[in-house]
Image (cartoon, rainbow, N blue to C red):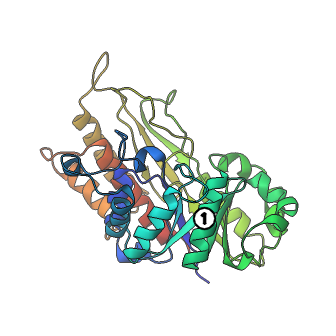
Amino acid sequence: MPVRYTPILRWKQGERIALTHLSPGARVDVTPHIVLTQAQFDPSSKKAAIPTKAKKKTPPPPSEYLSKQISDAWGKTAFFLDASDLSGTPSKHGLDDIAAKANAAGLSLVPSIKLNPPPVYASAVSRVVKHDHRGVALRISLGEMSSAASWMGAWSFPFSETDLIIDLGGSASTVLALGASVQMSFQTLNQATAWRSVTLASGAIPATLTGYTVGCTMLPRAELQLWNLIRSANLNYELHYGDYATIGPDSTTDGIEGPVPINAKYTILPDYAIFHGVKIKGPGAKPRDQQYRSYANHIVKMPNRSPLPHCWGDQMINAIAASGTSQPGSPASWVSYAVNRHIELTRHQLP
């Protein structure tokens, strides 16, 4: 059974662009997990994901626009969606509208839920699962995994229709240090072979680069090391892989005012290259284009970079490094290059 890869995404512009440009091979056995927020979905929000041109006219219903975004970027292959942040009532929730529009577009939406979710969201997930017959994803913490015996009897859906995602958040490095004890936890996972699938997801990218030295810092891909460690423990089930696709699990841009340092990330075989820059205004400032061009030049010279010829993100970075006059991109552009490269490389590394 091939290993499935689940990148956890927040459906920001750069992530959507990254998915759009994935090669056919990087889409095989990949199921993105989209975490949707009310700010992205609500058309009255300034941060809602509605196209600029549409704002001059009557914007499309948010569920219709979201479905088009997913269709354009990902297509009709299955994806998980956590819409628990959306508002609703016991009989009508934002997930209901999204699922209806997704079905109309021929998309394969599988709702994702956590233990003890908002009741209105739990009701919506039940309706969608009953109507669509695609099952459900359950995202739990390591602590909830350890206490599974206390809640599994009350789980509302058949195990055989549930994709279990054990999400460690940003604690991959901490859990990795547990060594054999964490291996044993997965060896004795309750009903491991009964779930439709079991995925370990985590992240190692810090929520903020504050305090990091300006320049390039290499960070181990602890989440991949952890998955390899646990998978080597002779499990009697397939353990699938998930991560946060170079975005810190606890990262947020809410309330952050500019100008901010120009940062970037790039994934190589064993590590993340974290580029921490400076602001574009004020003491010690440098132009944004200059910083991005220096990152591209650094990346192409990395001895263990392992560029992928079919990777759009690599192609874009190569082009920036090769030209002293072309535009070196924007923050959203560099997110798209990094996420595209990360998914391409990770799918290439997994069995």
Farthest residue to the top: give it: 283
Q: Is residue 320 left or right of residue 234?
A: left
| Residue 53 screen position, x and y as percent | 19, 50
| Residue 68 screen position, x and y as percent | 33, 65
Farthest residue to the left: give it: 325
Q: Is residue 117 left or right of residue 263?
A: right
Using the rendered image of the protein, determine whether residue 335 is visible from the camera's viewpoint.
yes
Element assignment for label 1: helix
Viewer-nearest residue: 319 or 167 = 167
Q: Which residue is mark 1?
A: 125
Mark 1: amino acid: Val
Give the residue at x 85% y 57%.
Answer: 147
Give the residue at x 78% y 78%.
Answer: 236
Image quarter of residue 303: bottom left
Farthest residue to the right: give it: 150
Using the rendered image of the protein, determine whether residue 8 is visible from the camera's viewpoint.
no
Viewer-nearest residue: 326 or 251 = 251
Give the residue at x 62% y 84%.
Answer: 1
Q: Is residue 282 above or below residue 155?
A: above
